[in-house]
Image (cartoon, rainbow, N blue to C red):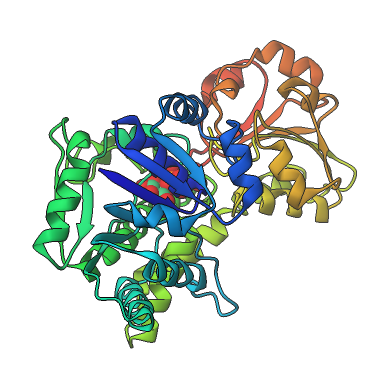
Amino acid sequence: MKIAVVGTGYVGLVTGTCFAEVGIDVTCIDIDQKKIDNLKQGILPIYEPGLEEIVSRNVDAGRLHFSTNLGEAIQECDVAFIAVGTPPGEDGSADLKYVLAVARSIGENMTDYCVVVTKSTVPVGTAAKVRREIEAALERRDADIEFDVASNPEFLKEGAAIDDFLKPDRIVVGVSSERAEDVMSKLYKPFLLNGHPIIFMDIPSAEMTKYAANSMLATKISFMNDIANLCEIMGADVNMVRRGIGSDARIGHRFIYPGIGYGGSCFPKDVKALIRTASENGYDMQVLKAVESVNEAQKSVLFDKVSKHFGGELKGKKMAIWGLSFKPKTDDMREAPSLVIIEKLLNAGCSVSAYDPVAIQEAKHSLGDTITYAKDPFEALIDADALLVVTEWPEFRAPNFGVVGKLMKEKAIFDGRNIYDAKELAELGYTYHCIGIKT
Ligand code: UGA
């Protein structure tokens, strides 16, 4: 089998590389010549644990190719994945111009039957638009070539994408013909060895599944953040409540950790998109609107605690920040709660010294020199009036609190991820604030 993956962003690169890893011949295409030249030399455009190693292994094995020539790759492939970006347009809806341009190009170049699969997260109805675009291109060429479209949403988590791809919980594929179903079954067979299913369905349902999955997960998080805030008011401990409810198999232990709000490129965008799709079709997604507004408010919770602790007198205070990326194991700063927290601290007259193991370069694109960047977690603490733990990187979990306390001006910790033990820190003389636990 031969496949082409168009778009070498996060989704495309992980998809192409993981298919190559199981022995499939893959060509990853991008219009950005520099990106392709870099990839050929093993230089990746994103940080994802383990990816660099698998890319170079499969390039060396001759199974993974990088090219800017879509026309050539499409002529030889059984399946073509469209994994290009869908940036929000002026009105906030997903801009499909790149997706449809790729579809057109596929129609202009295909020579044989091929399944064209949308992998980017796209609104319900996009696969139908892709089909029309290819049909029109074939008509212009006066070519009579059979093809199918399919929708195959991805459920990869940044930081764990390789594992998620190689050992998926499930694979969802929307198809409209038996032939396409056969091709996609064959393609994914190597990934089903752990017994997890490939679920075939109609195309609009597959497109909707992606939005429903992310929206459900975002709902769990906002719900727990609401409960955490109420726990604080009522004198309950959200960690206990979380364990208590998570033991009910219908609820489950995963994705019920309160914090400072969800960020990243997926949840905020997909929740917004689903609210929008619904409203364009005359339906009001009341729950999701609340999910979104709870999330916006939650990003301010840590700042509010800091402000309250210092009686609103923040001018001239130095704040240390541990963690900038929206979550650990990624350098992704998109919609990161750190950005909101830092903006509030700066507006209140604080100076900020931040440390992150991998995201500093990315953070500089949005924060520039408004804050200082420390080369290790301890440097950030020197003379700080408080430490704010914003991202739960493993290296922040068990610092030497003796050293931490000596470096700081005041032993005050504001933990946005509930990674420390309140009792232990109190014994060590710290003022400790976290989410959902009265301290
Ligand atoms: C998310 C989904 O988890 C993936 O299944 C999906 O494929 C992906 O979006 C996508 O649509 O591409 P990702 O954005 O990488 O993946 O990050 P998550 O690990 O899901 O975390 C999202 C946010 O939720 C983070 O800000 C995290 O800190 C927060 N979170 C997560 C919580 O606040 N509490 C939790 O219990 C879990």
Q: Is residue 421 above or below residue 140?
A: above
Front one among 281 and 143: 143
The answer to whether any part of residue 228 appears in the image is no
Front one among 116 and 172: 116
Residue drawn at 66 percent across, 37 percent down: 359
Q: Is residue 234 above or below residue 86?
A: above
Image-based side of 323 in relation to 55, left or right: right
Q: The C terminus lies in which quarter of the figure?
A: top right
The answer to whether any part of residue 409 appears in the image is yes
x, y percentage for residue 301? 60, 51
x, y percentage for residue 230? 44, 52
Image-based side of 199 in relation to 347, left or right: left
Quarter holding residue 223: bottom left
Residue placed furthest toward the left = 178
Image-based side of 350 in relation to 416, left or right: right
Residue placed furthest toward the bottom = 282
Q: The N terminus lies in which quarter of the figure?
A: top left
x, y percentage for residue 360? 72, 37
